[in-house]
Image: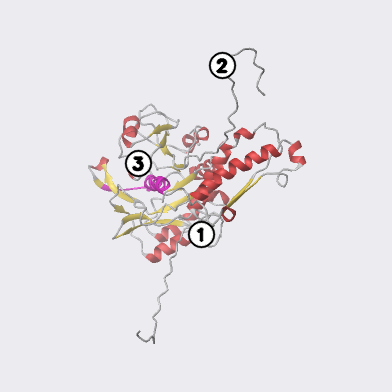
Amino acid sequence: MPAAKQYPGVHIEEVQSGDCAIEGVATSITAFIGRTPHGPSNIPWTVSSYAEFKNDFGESGGENTLANAVDDFFANGGRQALVVRVFRDDGTPEGLPPDEASYQAVFDALRKTAFNLLCLPPDNATGDVDKVVLPDALKLCVDRRAFLIVDPRSDWSAPSDVLDSSKGLTALGLSGDAARNAAVFFPRIKKADPARSGRISTFVPCGAVAGVMARTDAHHGVWKAPAGLDAGVKNIQGLSVSLTDRENSELNSVGVNCLRSFPESGPVVWGARTLRGDDQSDDEYKYVPVRRLALFIEESLYRGTQWVIFEPNGEPLWAQIRLHVGAFMHNLFRQGAFAGKSPREAYFVRCGKEMTTSDDVDLGIVNILVGFAPLKPAEFVIIKISQIAGQDEA
């Protein structure tokens, strides 16, 4: 209530705006962890172009496979990268190759930093990231509501290697519900190597795939599968393995996303399944865009409802929550993020007595239930053709 005015004149009062609108968070900030010749160590360092990366961390080639991945990221549509240089000091500028302990020294720095995608380009000395690092990386992604892009291993020279129980997909050690936050892509890519006078070498595809995801998010939204003829992989000369349709089918059925090259489009991402996307598991987060949309909604609501803390826990608060969360979800519906012809079919927001009991209120708890109907990729387009026989001409 305005204070009583004691004299004629202009009086200024501060009032609450009541604006608690929920903003969508970023979807494609990509963290790269690995070895570089120089630069800040064990801290996330933001770069917005490959030129910035070269200035801060050094050129691509040789053991700087991280540089190649960052180059691919920006060449394919990436806009913001977080680079974490893993450094084991042995008295030389280059340091020792990273091990599990040195990787672990960074997963605290990243826990305090917002990112959406995680890439782990391997150290060139071995051609692969140590397998024991991947589960820790996946756990970090689950904790931070991010998504892990998993590279094919150097000994996967054919689809049979990917399916091999001793060295293939199962040997990565990424399983269970956490695997919803990860996807693997096969095969590796071929491109010019500055360290070998521009001769063609083989590199991991994580940076290129992250760039395709960023480009797809910007053009269509995080709910669109980053795959298909418009998901072309740029800045490369080819793929290390040329897959047939039958081999593609075998890999797709176990949740491996293929990179293919077609005459009309060139190299493209041709799969959009998470590591819970095999045909047998029937997981609700089988598809990459469905999982990434859920992570986007979770993080946006997490940040956008911080104002609720310490507010009086009753119907006026619940009504505000329904209003602001509902407005956020409706905006996504209008952009085409959900299945369903009407808001009622596409999403719901519940917050009230049916969700928050008197016992919850006594404990300081307010419960919010949000549901959405996801759009799933059209993986298989079936065209049925028949002839019409016996028709008389008009």
Q: Nearer the viewer, residue 344 or 85?
A: 344
Which residue is farthest top? Answer: 7
Indicate the amino acid at tag 1. Answer: Asp
Question: Which residue is drawn at the image coordinates 43% and 37% (left, top)?
Answer: 98
Helix, strand or loop under label 1: loop
- SS class, disc 3: helix
Q: Nearer the viewer, residue 143 or 77?
A: 77
Q: Quadrant of the N terminus?
A: top right
The region drawn magenta spans: 200-219
Q: Is residue 103 magenta?
A: no
The residue to which callout 3 is attached is: 74
Would you place residue 172 above or below residue 68 in this image?
below
Element assignment for label 2: loop
Q: Are marks 1 and 2 in contact (CB under 8 Å)?
A: no
| Residue kind at label 2, given as amino acid type | Val
Q: Is residue 285 left or right of residue 353?
A: left
Q: Quadrant of residue 322?
A: top right
On the image, numbered disc 2 is attached to which residue? 10
**Residue 235 location in percent, x, y?**
30, 47
